[in-house]
Image: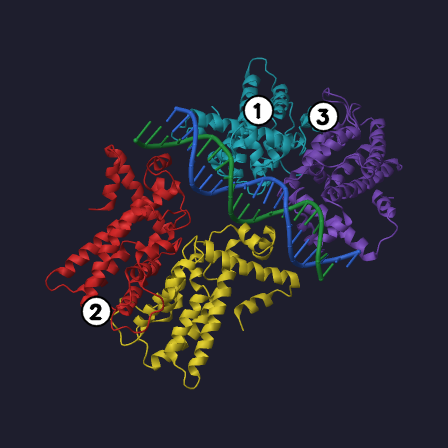
Chain colours: A red, B yellow, C cyan, D purple, E green, F blue
Amino acid sequence: MTTAASVQSRAPRMRADALRNRERIIAAAREMFVEHGAQVPLDEIARRAAVGNATVYRHFADRDVLMRQVVVSVLDRVTDLAERAVAAADTAGGDPSAELRRFVHAAADERIGALCPLLTAGFDKDHPDLIAVRLRLEAVLDALLERARTAGRLRADIGVGDLMIALSQLTRPLPGTACSGIDRYVHRHLQLFLDGLMSPAGSVLPGTAATLEDLRQRA
Amino acid sequence: MTTAASVQSRAPRMRADALRNRERIIAAAREMFVEHGAQVPLDEIARRAAVGNATVYRHFADRDVLMRQVVVSVLDRVTDLAERAVAAADTAGGDPSAELRRFVHAAADERIGALCPLLTAGFDKDHPDLIAVRLRLEAVLDALLERARTAGRLRADIGVGDLMIALSQLTRPLPGTACSGIDRYVHRHLQLFLDGLMSPAGSVLPGTAATLEDLRQRA
Amino acid sequence: MTTAASVQSRAPRMRADALRNRERIIAAAREMFVEHGAQVPLDEIARRAAVGNATVYRHFADRDVLMRQVVVSVLDRVTDLAERAVAAADTAGGDPSAELRRFVHAAADERIGALCPLLTAGFDKDHPDLIAVRLRLEAVLDALLERARTAGRLRADIGVGDLMIALSQLTRPLPGTACSGIDRYVHRHLQLFLDGLMSPAGSVLPGTAATLEDLRQRA
Amino acid sequence: MTTAASVQSRAPRMRADALRNRERIIAAAREMFVEHGAQVPLDEIARRAAVGNATVYRHFADRDVLMRQVVVSVLDRVTDLAERAVAAADTAGGDPSAELRRFVHAAADERIGALCPLLTAGFDKDHPDLIAVRLRLEAVLDALLERARTAGRLRADIGVGDLMIALSQLTRPLPGTACSGIDRYVHRHLQLFLDGLMSPAGSVLPGTAATLEDLRQRA
DNA sequence: GATGAATGAGGCTTCATTCAT
DNA sequence: GATGAATGAAGCCTCATTCAT
């Protein structure tokens, strides 16, 4: 079950068209954030969603709320991907480290890198919705890493946060770009990074393994 | 000799105070871009430089020109670092791959990641100043990579652009952050990425090696 | 029917209050342009129209668009005056040259002279709306002059453009003036000019008769 | 003797280069005002005069002073023209009305129309220099008109101000234009206006004859 | 509930004027 | 005396947000 669903279930009920509008706005916002950066005018998002601008405000009190919902939405989907990766790893004959690699590339395709620019000033990183999805994601990723470690394919000195931060950064879009340019290379660099993650360790890492909690504190 | 020097020498001469102001503005702009992103108000930059706002416009016709000069300034310093790394590698007993690692971490400390957000729409990536510094950087980095490859420590399937893109992305600051948060982990992730760069290759890379020319086309 | 009406009908529909604001802004702009010249701050126009400054930009993308609409609006009214003059001249017992004189003085009262300063750099004189109203005006003025010529009261060597240019110039307001000063004499000078237009010709004119097309090319 | 000379003689003495700069600035200012209107940036005038911007301020305390000096300079030259016209009319066989016509066209070529936009808000029309040149001009023009009246060629109901106002207005340049466009027709319209000035009167004029004093009050 | 319109605060840029060399 | 540079006060325009239909 996705976190987004639980969010929606909070309000008593919603008219079908209102619900449809809400989804369209989030989808449009994600696309616009990906393509034009975090400060795209809300009117543009409204136009892309084929909705009046005031409708955006009816659903999301201000820009920060909208950004948070987009983040939650993407993290939900990424968490789903991670869950599927764990399940596949647990299947008879599953290869945890191959599943980890697959997950990383799939998360990149979900534009997880586009979330970075949203974690800007004024973004409440301690909002319950965020905490919830973060915990879910951390738990399942921990499981995935643990599988790979147990299989002896993953170095021991890295944590969930290391993976997520680097994954996010390496796939971060350039502002004002439709991502077409960078996409050509993103998967190369992810592959290189993944190679670095594999054991035996190629070097001693400075610092300590990051958790998602550290990721929270970054901004 | 740095590219910036040649840029300044173009105009016949500059009064001492004007030159001082120019440098202060570029320094302030770099700091503000690093800390608050590409769209900090120019008035804030002026205040940080302890200069009237119009003075910024006297030196830099508009925001794009200022951004370009900051980019050139940083790339100049990074190129200098790379030159030193090559020189050290060529010293008797020099270790090319160790010098490459050192260079990567040093470039991170020069805030090269802060340049990414500047490569935004309206940024003229074909400006002569940029082409010049890019060529210089590419040449010296090529030399550095070649040394490491010859020493048998670097995979053969990566190019200068792969290194620079990943380095830039992994060190990119979060908007609205004084970089303190991410800095704790940046060097870990660089280390992991560097491990992935080392031979023998851990996996087959998709796509082809990137050049700095590709980096130009990204935006 | 006026050209302005056709312009408005282009957009599907407009809310009543928006339409009211639009008219108020044009009216305020005309007054401000007349009284304070072409470069009055748009904020002043907004204040005069009792409207927020951004509302001006909602209706008119930039200063040039607003100026054009004001020009069209005034030319529309002047064209209406000319049509009435032709109709009166065609009435039984109508005196074409007297109607011409009346038209000239009436056009002056419509502040047609205030349009001159608006035909400044950046003003698109080939905009469809302008072409349309110019053609309408030229046609009806041609008819009026032809009536007067046929009645033997108008010299043969002058064209529509001669009349409109001189009329505009002679009634042009001084910047920073509420027109009160010049108004005392404008009608005297128009009368003198009209006397010069009457036949028999008092002198040989240099150049050739101007058309409104020439007037367009002036700027 | 010109008024400008008397103005300069007020200050004790001037270095030769300073005097040359002063003249260059006035000449440049006149050209720029004619071509680009009254609000051309002073820096542009300085550049055209090949002089530093601060030098403009050394010679002319502020924009208004510079504008006044330009006005005085042009009126001086126009007055000289009028004096020559009177002299020619007084010559044996001189034709006062032909000289009047010649004077009007010559004054137009001196760009007298460009003065209108300078008579803007903040312009001190009662400055001694202006009063002086105005009196001189009025006296000599009065003489010229009187000659023409006596010769029976000029209507009796017009004054000096009527002539100067209409002359100025009809030759007024459009802002943002190099005057090339309007120049083609200016002399036609002056000719028409002059025809209207000739006797016998073609109509009864409203109002009363204008003096240059009225012209002063216009702005 | 949805919408188009209105608003005011704020950023960019220009320019008259003053200062320092 | 002449100059290039510095300055701050507006003006234009955008955009997040609120209001009226």
Q: CA distance from mark 2 to mark 3?
A: 97 Å
Quarter holding the C terminus of chain D is: top right
Please, is residue C122 above or below residue C34 in the view? below
Quarter holding the N terminus of chain D is: top right
Please, is residue D61 above or below residue C23 in the view? below
- Is B163 left, or right, of B77 in this rendering? left
The residue to which callout 3 is attached is: C185
Q: Residue D61 at x, y = what percent?
A: 76, 46
Q: CA distance from mark 1 to mark 3?
A: 25 Å
Amino acid type, residue under disc 2 in the picture: Arg
Q: Residue at x 54, y 35 (%)?
A: C67
- Is C19 left, or right, of F6 in this rendering? left
The residue to which callout 1 is attached is: C144
Q: Residue at x 55, y 20 (%)?
A: C84
- Is A39 left, or right, of D138 in this rendering? left
Q: Chain of mark 3?
A: C
The quarter of the picture where residue D137 lies is top right
The quarter of the picture where residue C187 lies is top right
Q: Residue D74 at x, y = what percent?
A: 77, 42
The circle drawn on residue A208 is none
Dot 1: few (<14), some (14–19), or many (≥20) neighbours within 10 Å?
Answer: many
The residue to which callout 2 is attached is: A153
Residues at discs 2 and 1 in contact (Cβ within 8 Å): no
Dot 3: few (<14), some (14–19), or many (≥20) neighbours within 10 Å?
Answer: many
Q: Residue at x 39, y 49 (%)?
A: A38
Q: Circle 1 sits in a helix, a strand or a loop, which is it?
A: helix
Amino acid type, residue under disc 3 in the picture: Tyr
Farthest residue to the left: give it.
Answer: A92
Farthest residue to the bottom: give it.
Answer: B92
- Foreground residue among D111 and F13: F13
